[in-house]
Amino acid sequence: MSTKDCGHHHASHRRLIRLVLVGVAAFILVVLFLVFLIWVILRPAKPRFTLQDATLFTFNLSSPIPNTLSLTMQVTLSAHNPNSRIGVYYHALHLHASYRSQQISLPTALPDTYQGHHDFTVWSPFLYGNTVPVAPFVLASLQQDQNAGTVMVNVKINGRVKWKVGTWVSGRYHIYVNCPAYISFAGDRSNAEGVKFHLLQSCSVDV
């Protein structure tokens, strides 16, 4: 092979590499543009959760050592899918009650659910905590809030969601929901039983 033919071969090889790189870059740009276009058209929004009410059956504090709390509570939660073109799958949802970041009930599982466009889903689970050990400062704060007449308990949900557009289903995303529940005590503040609180409290949602 002559020097001229060899140079022509190398030039053709470089042109081929450039064409391949340009093609790959163009493909990536088209995919990114389609993803952006789908996002703009569909305008995905996070589900909206509302804590509708809470019925308190047991809320007993025990001290001195061991410092414990016994809790039995039923809550009504609603979830709304605000999207007009996107469905939502809820998977492995668990909720629990907490006070000042300390978990005060066992996790309660919610059933897996699919939510269509603009659909609502309502759950009414129970939360149980039997003689749950609490830190001394938590107990002192609980007693102070009880004496003041109001205790804020956070109902928290952890789980996974998947988005559905047509026949396409996304991977799983973590969802975290935090619902503040303001519990009022009247009369015997050391023990409140069978009291239902209508809250209609919006929850914060992170996906």
Image (cartoon, rainbow, N blue to C red):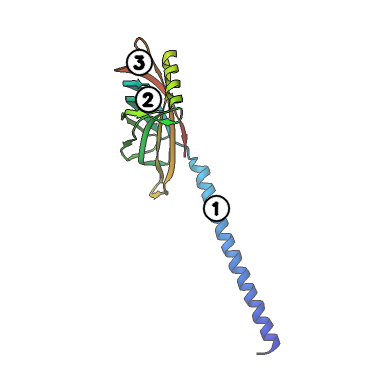
Circle nearer the viewer, 1 or 2: 2
The residue to which callout 3 is attached is 190
**Residue at (35% x, 15% y) in the render:** 190
What is the total number of numbered labels drawn onto the structure image?
A: 3
Q: Tell me the kind of residue under disc 3.
A: Ser
The quarter in which the N terminus is drawn is: bottom right
Q: Tell me the kind of residue under disc 1.
A: Leu
Q: Nearer the viewer, residue 31 or 153?
A: 153
| 100 lies above or below 144 | below
Visible in this render: residue 82?
Answer: no
The residue to which callout 2 is attached is 65
Q: Secondary structure at mark 3?
A: loop
Q: Residue pushed farthest top? A: 187
Q: Nearer the viewer, residue 4 or 139?
A: 139
User: Dot 2: within a 10 Å radius of its alpha carbon, few (fewer than 14), some, or many (20 or more) residues?
Assistant: few
User: Dot 3: within a 10 Å radius of its alpha carbon, few (fewer than 14), some, or many (20 or more) residues?
Assistant: some
Q: Position of residue 16 (x, y in %)?
A: 61, 73
The residue to which callout 1 is attached is 32
Please report contact status of discs 1 and 2: CB closer than 8 Å, yes or no: no
Name the image quarter holding residue 26.
Answer: bottom right
| 2 lies above or below 40 | below
As drawn, the label of residue 169 is: none
